[in-house]
Image (cartoon, grey):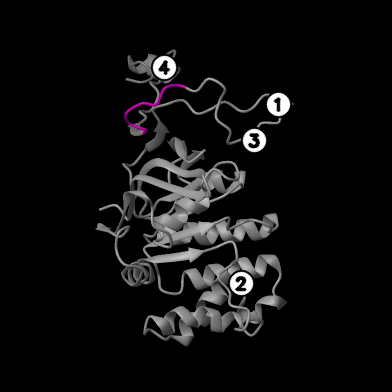
Amino acid sequence: MATLAALDLYRFYHTGTEETRALRGGSFALDPDEFVALVGPSGSGKSTLLACLAGLDVPDGGQVELMGERIARLPEPERTLRRRRHVGMLTQSRNLLPGLTAEENVRLPMRLAGRPDGGRAAGLLADVGLDARRGAMPSELSGGEAARAGLAVALALSPSLLIADEPSAEVDAATEADLLRLLSERCAAGSAVLAATHSRTLAASATRVLRLDDGRIVDDARSLKPRTWPGASGPRGARWRPCCPRPSPSPPGTGSPWWAPPAAASPPCSTSWRVSTIPAPARSPGPPSARARRCGRSRWG
């Protein structure tokens, strides 16, 4: 069963007589232990899509399935209950309430869910490298520390799905590497991770990349490298590769972002990816060795 599925999602906003089409029929599914990067230009609908998937917003058309249950048309209290049970959110505001310390912020979702556990809160902060900053207020944390504290809040209830909106924005390379390690560890534990990002490093670390443009999913490609964490699905020796060719890098000097679609995109195929077990290359027999000649055998006989 897929952890999350989006089924033909549409979302429109109206200002007077003007209509903004934020989402235009996007569909995809996330499996357990998948790490998916959602990329695209600013204003392409990434944050709107994440809000609809988490049940924070209601799409105008289509459905969202969370752990096999449709949630898009449920009343808001029901959506909140299911989000609390299954989803961890890391927002651009870093999930931190300004009047609470870092540790109190992590404890809060546990208390609301009726599962208070002070030891787990301290352990999560230690995992993200903030053991010495448990009593700090959000205003006293650096950008990287706030990002890691927000991730600890998102992981407080061990969610099946982690949704992150720009998790590595405004952090240095070392902090980004720490965040990627923590996200990969969540995948190793069986969670699905969906992260909207402009970071090429994060996208390269994902097992799958969704590209969004003008409210549409225009590319859905698996990583060419195998999953490396324990328990990752896929046959031994398999490689994930897209059926459709990936866009080539932008020519120097064009100024096009790395995730921009190619000028002449190939027509989409009905299946966006396949698993291909790559056999070992055939070995050339080569000339027989001296010992093989003495024994009357070829080198590879």
Determine the image quadrant of residue 94. Answer: bottom right
Q: Are marks 3 and 1 in contact (CB under 8 Å)?
A: no
Residue range highlighted in magenta: 266-272
Mark 1–mark 2 distance (CA, rounded to whole Å) = 40 Å
As drawn, the residue found furthest toward the right would be 253
Determine the image quadrant of residue 149. Answer: bottom right
x 54%, y 63%: residue: 91
Q: Amino acid at mark 2?
A: Gly
**Which residue corresponds to mark 2?**
129
**Which residue corresponds to mark 3?**
257
Q: Secondary structure at mark 2?
A: loop
Q: Are marks 3 and 2 in contact (CB under 8 Å)?
A: no
Q: Secondary structure at mark 3?
A: loop
x 45%, y 47%: residue: 12
Q: Amino acid at mark 3?
A: Pro
x 44%, y 17%: residue: 289
**Residue nearest the observer in this picture, 100 or 215:** 215
In the rendered view of the protein, which quadrant contains the C terminus? top left
The mark found on residue 32 in the picture is: none
Q: Amino acid at mark 1?
A: Thr
Q: Secondary structure at mark 4?
A: loop
**Which residue corresponds to mark 4?**
284
Mark 4–mark 1 distance (CA, rounded to whole Å) = 45 Å
Q: Amino acid at mark 4?
A: Ser
Q: Secondary structure at mark 1?
A: loop
Mark 4–mark 3 distance (CA, rounded to whole Å) = 44 Å
